[in-house]
Image (tube, rainbow, N blue to C red):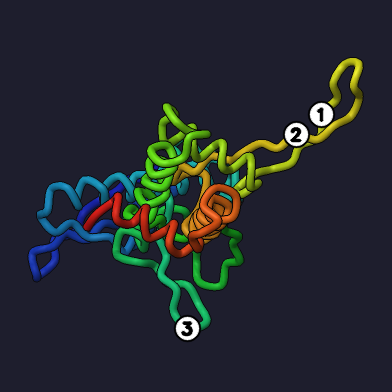
Amino acid sequence: MHVTVRKKKLADGRESLYLDIYQGKGRRRKKSLGLYLTGDKKKDKETLRVAEQVRVKRQVDLDAGGRRFRAPVLMAKLETIELRIEKGCLVPLDDRAKMLLRSRGYAVGDVVTADLRKERNGRYHRLVFALGNVVAENIEAFSGMDAHSVLKKLQLESEAGCDRKGISLPGVGACTVIVPRSLSYQEMDETEFQEVSKMLCAHVAIVYWPTMTPEEVEHMATNWVGD
């Protein structure tokens, strides 16, 4: 049994992609992928890549005797699928998201699990690092430190975006250490990142600038970032 990706010319000029499944003894079956080539080289390259992922998975299923299973397929690392929140549900953000869903073999009615993360706001990310620069320039305890080091110190002091871990030290015994988590795009989503940012501003206001409010501290960082 063999699976091939083939194209069919459409009246509107696009090419429809489908799987040509040879089942042996002259028997063939066609399955539309719902994917189309439009003439846009960049988009068509992505579409063909997705079609090939679907073909490989279907070939694996056939080689396993037709059983549908979730065995790992040798392919590139799964890409993030972007979804948009609508009333009471999540829907694919765009055509690319739809293609990626098809490439993984998901069908209507399937139950799936997901690690949902809110897209990070680039300007808000810069604002937090601007806070690190503001603190380094204006508070003696942080003099000479770069923005990253300042933020890590503030995280440790306030326990904002930190984990507590139990360890055992020779001669001391069991104890707990505070470990600041990474503020990178990959490690922290927008919702948590904004919460950590507000905690850092509040900590700076309470401990180092008691005459200022957390909102005023954030405003200083905003001015540092600019428009």
Q: Earlier in the sequence, mark 2 or mark 1?
A: 1
* Circle 3 SS class: loop
The part of the image, by quadrant, that contains residue 53 is: top left
Instruction: Establish if 11 lies above or below 203.
Output: below
Instruction: Establish if 203 lies above or below 72.
Output: below
Q: In whole angstroms, how far apart are the C-alphas of marks 2 and 1?
A: 7 Å
Q: In the image, what residue occupies the spot 37% across and 60% down? A: 219
Amino acid bearing label 2: Val
* Circle 1 SS class: strand
Q: Residues within 10 Å of mark 3 (few under 14, many from 20)?
A: few
Give the labeled residue for mark 2.
Answer: 177
| Image coords of residue 1 (percent x, y) | 45, 42
Amino acid bearing label 3: Lys
Select label 3 or label 1 by which is in front.
1
Q: Nearer the viewer, residue 69 or 176?
A: 176
Image disc number at residue 23: none
Image disc number at residue 167: 1
Q: Nearer the viewer, residue 113 or 67?
A: 113
* Circle 2 SS class: strand
| Image coords of residue 105 (percent x, y) | 48, 57
Q: Nearer the viewer, residue 215 or 75?
A: 215
| Image coords of residue 44 (percent x, y) | 19, 51
Q: Residues within 10 Å of mark 2 (few under 14, many from 20)?
A: few
Select label 2 or label 1 by which is in front.
2
Q: In whole angstroms, how far apart are the C-alphas of marks 3 and 2?
A: 42 Å
Q: Are marks 2 and 1 in contact (CB under 8 Å)?
A: yes
